[in-house]
Image (cartoon, coloured by chain):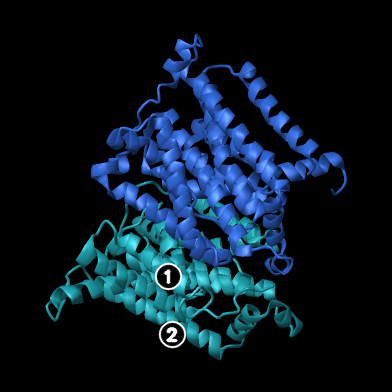
Amino acid sequence: MDALLQFIFSGMTVGAVYALVALGFTIIYNASDVVNFAQGEFVMLGGMITVFTYMAGVPLPLAAVLAIVATAAVGVALNKLAIEPARGAPVVSLIIITIGASILIRGAAQLIFDKQLHRFPAFSGDAPLRVMGATILPQSLWVIGGAILVFVGLWLFFTRTLTGKAVLATANNRVAAQLVGINTNWVMTLSFGLSAAIGAFAGVLVTPITLVSYDIGVGLALKGFAGAMLGGMGNPKGALVGGLLLGLLEAMTAGYLSSQYKDAVAFIVILAVLFVMPHGLFGSKSVERV
Amino acid sequence: MGSRRKWIQLAVLAALIIVLPFFFPSSYYYRVGALIFVNALAVVGMVILIGYAGQISLGHAGFAGIGAYACALAPEYLGLHPGLALILGAVTSGVLALLIGRPILRLKGYYLGVATLGFGILVSMVLTNERALTGGPDGMSVADPGLRGMLRDLGWRLSVGELWYGVSAIALLIGAWVALNLFDSPTGRAMRALHGSEVAASTVGVDVARQKLRAFVISALYASVSGSLLALQNGFITPDVAGFMHSIEMVTMAVLGGVGSVLGGTLGAAILTTLPQVLTIFAEYEQLVLGAVMILVMIFLPQGLLPSIARRFRGRDE
């Protein structure tokens, strides 16, 4: 039982990060029909910028805020410079553009920062807490709590504010949204900024546990993408469930079966789910927009 | 495309292959050339899958990995000749593509993307993790197929570079010939019809699922043979051949050059294969430049390089 609880803790921690990355995918997909493969790079930037501003003597909380703001700016720039000019391009071209962007950001990060692994101190120390025979790092609680905060905050944003409703309207039907006076270009910019900020936030939270280097983005993007697809692309609830489920599955596989194949099981489950439910767990049947 | 244009394209390709070596400053360029042809072969497969049938795959490096490791493993464990191992790899890839293609190809767009991506990652993971068999991430050596010795007995003395330049070029020409023939065949027309609109294609009697599966299997064969040739000419292979980045490279090469066209795909392969060689002087900037090239071409030449250039020369739309 202790072992199971232990695996659940580690699965929840990783799963929370996947859920945040998946949420980033979902927000951008909803606003623009683009799957942004540079999403993992936002997590990397969040971690890296925090590390380097912190090493330069800036207090940690301020460094984290700076990193999130700077990454949001990168997200907006990505939209303005690479996505907007390619409006209406086929899916393959958009995939290549965002993968190109991810390679570009990785290359830039490797030049501006370095190729080393980095970390900064955990927010509330490194002494593990004992819970019913299992242990959990205080930083894991920060990660899980942070993810919950983001999801609740976004839910309030989408349901209680006019701007949030404008984003939802654009996701539902871009032309209709334009007809009622919503500036859909602005919605897209906002979505890229928001999604980059969420990614960076995840990076800030998880760096003390998993460390950060310039090349962590690809793996995270694949897992986040898989999580988003598992839940059903375009559905924030799906992103949460898909991400957490993926994290738990990985932890269970690593614990009970084989740590080498923990990544494999995630993709096997995704293939199985897609075979049975071609639109993911929570995806609507009418995702194809003609 | 009439049969005249088919032969013109093949002739252009053959002429380039024959003429280029006269401009090679050193024998190193034979290796680069061979690498271009091997990549181009896989890309021609992607042209059939993406350009003809309109389906996407982010996992075709998985098939390249199967082809490559067939050539590494079969001679060592089964005592098979490397040439037969290439065929074994292709058959394995084809059967696998047939098996996973049916459920996967019901998916569309990004969902198809993630499913194929999952397949590719599973293959590369197996190759990386089964250390006892494959040597793990460090890779394994590939037996020499003995082609050079055979040719020497026939009185043909070729350097290693020249030999593989020739072999890859012939493989590419055959691959291009098959793809160009397919374009105008009933199967090719059916594929292109479903690319335009699946609904419209099925109303005129095209078996959509069957044609998609055909394109998928054919492109898997191309990728597999390309992987095999890569393994044979390098004499060494690592799981990177099946990695996610290799899958992305294949798609990018196809789209970069012009996804509907065999010559365009070859051009894309040539550019993306030589780019890192040119950039080794600026190794630090390699990723930066590669990423920028990918973005800029997609924004400014959305049809790909070759069709955009061709249009400019004609001065008018086709």
Q: Does dot 2 land on a helix, a strand or a loop?
A: helix
| Chain seen in blue | B
Residue at the outermost right position:
B316
- As drawn, the label of residue A152 is 2
Q: Is residue B27 above or below residue B276?
A: above
User: Which chain is indicated by disc 2?
Assistant: A
Mark 1 vs mark 2: same chain? Answer: yes
In this view, the residue in front, B164 or A18, is B164
In this view, the residue in front, A280 or A51, is A280
| Chain seen in cyan | A
Confirm whether residue B148 shows in the render: yes
The N terminus of chain B: image quadrant: top right
Q: Residues within 10 Å of mark 2 (few under 14, many from 20)?
A: few
Q: Earlier in the sequence, mark 1 or mark 2?
A: 2
Give the labeled residue for mark 1: A227
Image coordinates for residue B221, horizontal then vertical, percent: 51, 45
Confirm whether residue A129 shows in the render: no
Residue at the outermost top position:
B155
